[in-house]
Amino acid sequence: RLINKEMVTVFFERNQHQLNSAQRARLRSVKETLRSNPDYTAVITGYADKTGSAAMNAWISEKRATAVRDYLLAQGIPKSKLIINYLGDEQSLSPNPADRKVEVQYLLNYTVEE
């Protein structure tokens, strides 16, 4: 079951996928939520806007989602509590900077098989 009320979003500059200090600070709440709610699993979804090719946008959205997952792994969150997903520019209608993002949502009582 998806828990929408606690979604966290981090935004990226055009063609960027590495986390800066502000993004890492924002993701600390994800770490704390997962630690204080052992029944939660994070769904990490990367997105891109329409400024590049579909292939480039799929690649950058995957890199963004992977950067978030890797940060959370480095913070001690088990891999079994993290799911990555990336949609490229599938949900973008324009070169909108707000579409350059990663969203983290939570599932209740779901564990990834390692």
Image (cartoon, helix red, strand yellow):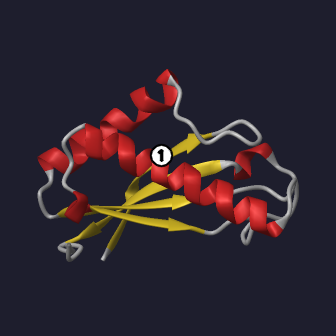
Amino acid type assigned to the residue bearing label 1 in the image: Ala
Farthest-out residue, top: 21
Q: Judge left or right: residue 62 versus residue 40.
A: right
The N terminus: image quadrant = bottom left
List the residue tagged with mark 1.
Answer: 67
Residue 88, relative to residue 8: is it above or below?
below
Residue 32, relative to residue 53: is it above or below?
above
Residue drawn 68% across and 65% down? 58
Callout 1 crowding tier (Cα within 10 Å): few <14, some 14–19, many ≥20: some
Residue drawn 44% across and 46% down? 68
* Res. 80 visible in picture: yes
Residue 45, relative to residue 70: is it above or below?
below
The C terminus: image quadrant = bottom left
x and y, in percent, of residue 53 in the image: 85, 63
x and y, in percent, of residue 113 in the image: 20, 77
x and y, in percent, of residue 99 in the image: 72, 52
* Res. 47 visible in picture: no
Tell how many labels. 1
Q: Secondary structure at mark 1?
A: helix
Residue drawn 72% across and 69% down? 91
Front residue (pair 15, 1): 15
Q: Judge left or right: residue 82 versus residue 24.
A: left
Front residue (pair 55, 2): 55
The image quadrant of residue 60 is bottom right
The image quadrant of residue 87 is bottom right
Front residue (pair 21, 34): 21
Q: Judge left or right: residue 113 versus residue 49.
A: left
x and y, in percent, of residue 84 in the image: 43, 64
